[in-house]
Image: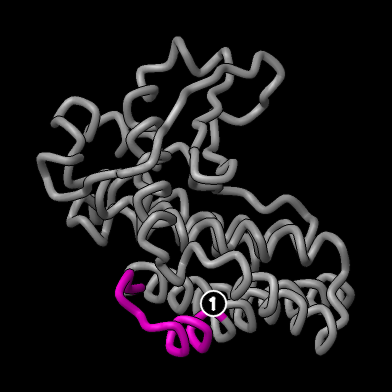
Amino acid sequence: MRKNGYEIRSEVSLSVDPKLSIMGYARKDGGKHTIVISEWALDSEMLGGLVLHELAHIYFTERGAVSHDTGLLEETMSEMRTNEGLRANESEYLMDAFNHLQNILVDDIVFTLLPDRELQMTTRFFSEWVSNRSSGDPVLDAALLCRNAFAIASLKRRSLFEDKGEMYYRNKAYVASLGDGAEEHFAWLEDFLEKSKSDWKEEEFREQLEGYFDRVLTVMRSFARFEDLK
């Protein structure tokens, strides 16, 4: 990362958590950063990409990127809870949606630095994220639509998406299973994530995030109304 202009100045340590269910995450303790990796991820071919991804998060955090401003996120979420009366599952999936936005920005670094072999593995990894069948839970289905949009946008953003390939048809089946309006919602979410910018200033990022959250919440509640009409 340093050789390519992404120097991290803080002390970074690695630790393994045998009980961790996800592959890993990064946390900050004072001026130090720790990348926590699940024990099972140590055997994954994606381990190198995981560490690089978490280092990219640390790089963004060190530089005070608005996408990694926890105060701004907490303010936006608090306003959503007050104005929209969010339920617990809606709050949870809005946080997932935020993680998609944050991840697609830091992955601009990751995709630049990954060697070809790991880049191919990462492409397959995103392909496995795409759902092709609705769950029947309208809020979860909205979250899965957002995840599909993130996976496809991640590859389109780097000109790696195969048009009319497996991901395309899996997502097409998923969108069709959700009924009217889903295709328009998916197109908005995918376009937003694909074109999001790491150099947005604070006010612009706040506006973009509020618009993104509004759209995701609209999808959740429109799917819920559709389910009630069945």
Q: Is residue 5 left or right of residue 108?
A: left
Q: Quadrant of residue 71?
A: bottom right
Residue at image position (38%, 30%) is 51
Instruction: Tell me, yes or no, if residue 176 can be seen here.
Output: no
- Where is 200 relative to 153, above or below? below
Q: Position of residue 154 (x, y in %)?
A: 34, 55
Circle 1: element type: helix
Which residue is disc 1 drawn over?
A: 185
Residue type, numbered disc 1 = His
Q: Quadrant of the C terminus?
A: bottom right
Q: Residue furthest front?
A: 31
Q: Residue furthest left?
A: 3
Instruction: Tell me, yes or no, if residue 76 can be seen here.
Output: yes
Q: Position of residue 19 (x, y in %)?
A: 71, 18
Looking at the rendering, the stretch of residues picked out in magenta corresponds to 196-209
Q: Quadrant of the N terminus?
A: top left
Q: Quadrant of residue 84?
A: bottom right
| Colour pattern | one colour
Decide which of 114, 193 is in the foreground and name it. 114
- Where is 39 relative to 82, above or below? above
Q: Judge the density around disc 1: few (<14), some (14-19), many (≥20) Cα neighbours within 10 Å.
A: some
Residue at image position (83%, 70%) is 227
Residue at image position (42%, 39%) is 54
Q: Position of residue 229 (x, y in %)?
A: 87, 78
Q: Position of residue 26 (x, y in %)?
A: 52, 39
Residue 42 in magenta stretch: no
Q: Residue furthest top?
A: 43
Residue at image position (45%, 83%) is 202
- Numbered label tally: 1
Decide which of 213, 2 is in the foreground and name it. 2
